[in-house]
Image: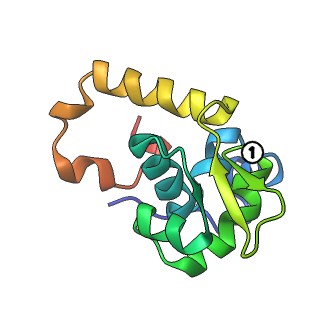
Amino acid sequence: MSRDTSNDPNNVVDRTRAEDPAGWLVLTQNDSAAKIIDALIKKKVRREMNKSEIADISGVSRQSVLNHIDLLIEIGVLDKVQRTKPQRYQFNLDSDVCKAVTRLDAAMHSDGIDNVEEGMLLEPFDSRDN
């Protein structure tokens, strides 16, 4: 098991990531945001949804949707539907982020992710292991 260095003030890599995170890190730093994007892409949702429906589709809490809705709008994954009350959202499968995640998903599956043992995907990554 590797030691968590994320709160170590001497860890230059973690400080740099915090100051200027890569897009991938922004997208995946919270499990719920990643689950929302994954579910919407996998299900190719094309209808308007409110926050509760997004939560149901994604398998996350409504509070998680509330916590991440601004990020999802900012990166183009969701668009606000104008003049709706309660506010409704449209999944933007054509956004650059969704296209990139879809390409990554296809690449991972073509490279054999389907054959990876289930538990391996959940193990923490430590760059010192490489």
Q: Residue 78, how many percent across, how many down?
A: 68, 50
> Camera-side residue: 120 or 97?
97
Q: How many numbered callouts?
A: 1
Say left or right for 85 vs 125.
Answer: right
Say left or right for 8 vs 58.
Answer: right
> Camera-side residue: 11 or 85?
85
Q: Residue 40, how many percent across, how many down?
A: 48, 49
Q: Quadrant of residue 89?
A: bottom right
What colouring does the structure picture have? rainbow
Q: Residue 76, how many percent across, how many down?
A: 73, 43
Residue on which disc 1 sits: 75
Q: Quadrant of residue 57?
A: bottom left
- Residue plotted at (80% across, 50% down): 74
- Residue plotted at (36% across, 27% down): 108
Say left or right for 12 vs 38.
Answer: right
> Camera-side residue: 30 or 16?
30
- Residue plotted at (53% across, 44% down): 46
Residue most extreme to the bottom: 63
- Residue plotted at (40% across, 42% down): 42
Q: Residue 114, how many percent across, how many down?
A: 20, 33
Residue type for callout 1:
Ile
Q: Quadrant of residue 52?
A: bottom right
**The N terminus is located in which quarter?**
bottom left
Q: Is residue 26 above or below residue 10?
A: above
Q: Is residue 100 above or below residue 11?
A: above
Say left or right for 112 vs 80.
Answer: left
**The C terminus is located in which quarter?**
top left
Element on which disc 1 rests:
loop
**Is disc 1 surrounded by few (<14), some (14 to 19) or many (20+) residues within 10 Å?**
some
Q: Is residue 24 above or below residue 53?
A: above
